[in-house]
Image (cartoon, helix red, strand yellow):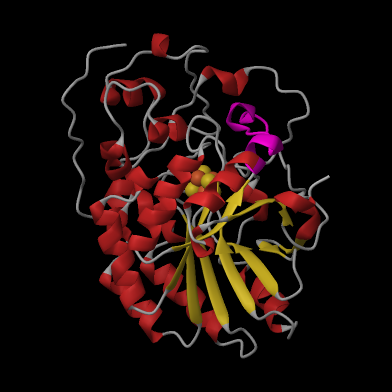
C-alpha cells in the first residue's frame, strides 16, 4: 500500500462547478487517494464511454491510502470491468421494450418514468444504465410535448418518476419548467425523483430547488441512492433536513455490492444513519447482469443470510426489502420469490 497523503479537495461553492470538477482520469483519482494501480489485483482502467466522475465532496469522504474503501470501490474503474463476463448485457432490464415515447418508460400501469437527463454527477461503476443510449432515448426539449402527451393521455398515471442519469443534474430552471408542466396534468398526484447527487453534492439543495418543491401541488418523493453510511456526511444530513422541512418524503434505495456493503453490520449502520437523517430504507437491490460490473455481484444465498441477520439487528421499518428487477415482471421481485 502507498503512503497516505494529506488530502483536502477543494469544494467550489456552486453545485454546477462541483459537477464539472467531478470528471477525473483514473490516474488522477488514484493520486487523490494516495494509491497506485498495483494496489488492485486486476489493476485499473480508463473507459472513455463511462469515465470516472467523482464530485469533490464525495472524494473527501474516501479514506486516503485504503484500497478497500467502500466509497472508493464504487467509483474506481477497476480492471475487472474489462475481464470476460459471460452472460452480461448492455440493457439488462430490457428497458428498450418499455419505451412509450422518446424519454418515457412505461413499466407499471400507474407510473410513468421520464429519462430526464443523461448526465450524472457521480459515475457508479455498478450502474445498470452504464451502457444506456441516452442520445436516442432521453427526454429532450423538442420531445417534451410528446412525452407529456403520453402522460396526459392516460388517466391511470398517478405518479411521474424523474430518473436518468440523474434528474438533479438538471438546472433549477429546467427542473422548474418540467415540474410545472407535469403538475398541469390533473391526474398526476405524485412526483418522484431518483437521485444520487445528494450524497455527492449536498450543495445541490439550493434555495431555488426548495422553492420549487414548496410551490408545486404535487406530493414530492425523493429516493436518494446511498449504499454506505459514510456517504451520509454532516453536510448531506443538513441538505436532507432542508428537503424534509420543505415537505419532501425521503426514501433510500441501495444496491447490494460485494466488498462495499455485503454484510449485515454495514447495512444496519446505513439504516440507522438514514433514519437519523429522516430517510426510510426502501429497497436493497440485487445487482442486474450489466456488462462490466460482475465483480459487484452478491449471490442470492448470501443476500438471504444478510436479510435474516438484518432482521435480528433492526426494527422492521428499518429493514430494506431485498429485490431483483426481472424483465417482463409487473413489479420488483422480492428475494423470497426468486426462482
Ligand atoms: S447516479 Fe445512478 S444513474 Fe448515475 S451512474 Fe450512478 S447509479 Fe447510474
Specify the farthest residue to the front: 312
Camera-side residue: 102 or 61?
61
Above or below for 212 versus 141: below
Residue 95 drawn in magenta: no
> Which percent across, then down, holds residue 250?
44, 68
What residue sits 72% from the left and 57% below the top?
332
Residue 294 drawn in magenta: yes
> Which percent across, then down, holds residue 204?
32, 59
What residue sits 49% from the left and 61% below the top?
315
> Which percent across, then down, holds residue 59?
30, 37
Query: Is residue 177 visible to us here?
Result: yes
Q: Which residues are magenta?
A: 289-304
What residue sits 32% from the left and 17% below the top?
35
Specify the farthest residue to the bottom: 186
Above or below for 6 versus 50: above
Above or below for 218 versus 95: below
Specify the farthest residue to the top: 38
Q: Quadrant of residue 309?
A: top right
Taking the image as shown, residue 205 lies to the left or right of residue 84, namely left
What residue sits 41% from the left and 33% below the top?
70
Quarter of the picture holding the C terminus = top right
Taking the image as shown, residue 337 lies to the left or right of residue 25, namely right
Query: Is residue 287 visible to us here?
Result: no
> Which percent across, then down, holds residue 231?
35, 46
Amino acid at each position: 500500500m502507498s503512503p497516505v497523503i494529506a488530502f483536502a479537495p477543494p469544494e467550489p461553492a456552486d453545485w454546477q462547478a462541483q459537477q464539472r470538477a467531478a470528471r477525473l482520469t483514473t490516474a488522477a483519482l488514484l493520486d487523490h487517494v494516495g494509491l497506485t494501480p498495483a494496489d488492485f489485483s486486476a489493476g485499473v482502467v480508463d473507459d472513455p464511454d463511462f469515465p470516472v466522475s467523482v464530485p469533490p465532496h464525495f472524494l473527501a469522504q474516501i479514506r486516503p491510502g485504503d484500497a478497500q474503501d467502500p466509497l472508493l470501490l464504487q467509483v474506481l474503474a477497476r480492471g475487472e470491468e474489462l475481464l470476460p463476463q459471460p452472460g452480461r448485457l448492455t440493457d439488462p432490464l430490457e428497458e428498450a421494450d418499455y419505451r412509450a415515447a422518446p424519454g418515457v418508460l412505461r413499466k407499471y400501469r400507474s407510473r410513468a418514468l421520464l429519462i430526464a437527463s443523461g448526465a450524472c454527477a457521480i459515475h457508479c461503476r455498478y450502474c445498470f444504465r452504464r451502457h444506456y443510449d441516452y442520445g436516442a432515448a432521453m427526454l429532450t426539449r423538442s420531445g417534451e410535448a410528446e412525452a407529456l402527451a403520453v402522460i396526459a393521455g392516460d388517466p391511470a398515471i398517478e405518479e411521474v418518476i424523474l430518473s436518468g442519469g440523474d434528474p438533479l443534474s438538471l438546472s433549477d430552471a429546467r427542473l422548474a419548467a418540467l415540474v410545472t408542466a407535469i403538475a398541469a396534468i390533473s391526474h398526476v398526484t405524485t412526483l418522484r425523483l431518483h437521485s444520487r447527487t445528494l450524497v455527492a453534492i449536498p450543495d445541490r439543495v439550493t434555495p431555488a430547488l426548495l422553492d420549487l418543491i414548496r410551490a408545486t401541488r404535487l406530493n414530492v418523493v425523493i429516493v436518494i441512492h446511498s449504499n454506505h453510511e459514510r456517504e451520509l456526511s454532516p453536510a448531506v444530513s443538513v441538505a436532507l433536513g432542508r428537503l424534509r422541512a420543505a415537505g419532501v418524503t425521503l426514501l433510500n434505495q441501495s444496491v447490494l455490492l460485494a466488498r462495499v456493503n455485503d454484510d449485515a453490520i454495514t447495512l444496519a449502520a446505513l439504516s440507522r444513519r438514514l433514519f437519523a437523517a429522516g430517510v426510510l430504507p426502501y429497497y436493497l437491490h440485487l445487482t442486474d447482469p450489466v456488462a462490466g460490473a460482475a465483480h459487484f455481484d452478491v449471490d442470492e444465498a448470501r443476500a438471504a443470510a444478510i436479510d435474516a441477520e438484518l432482521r435480528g439487528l433492526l426494527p422492521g421499518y428499518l429493514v430494506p426489502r431485498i429485490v431483483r428487477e426481472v424483465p417482463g415482471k409487473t413489479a420488483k421481485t422480492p428475494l423470497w420469490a426468486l426462482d
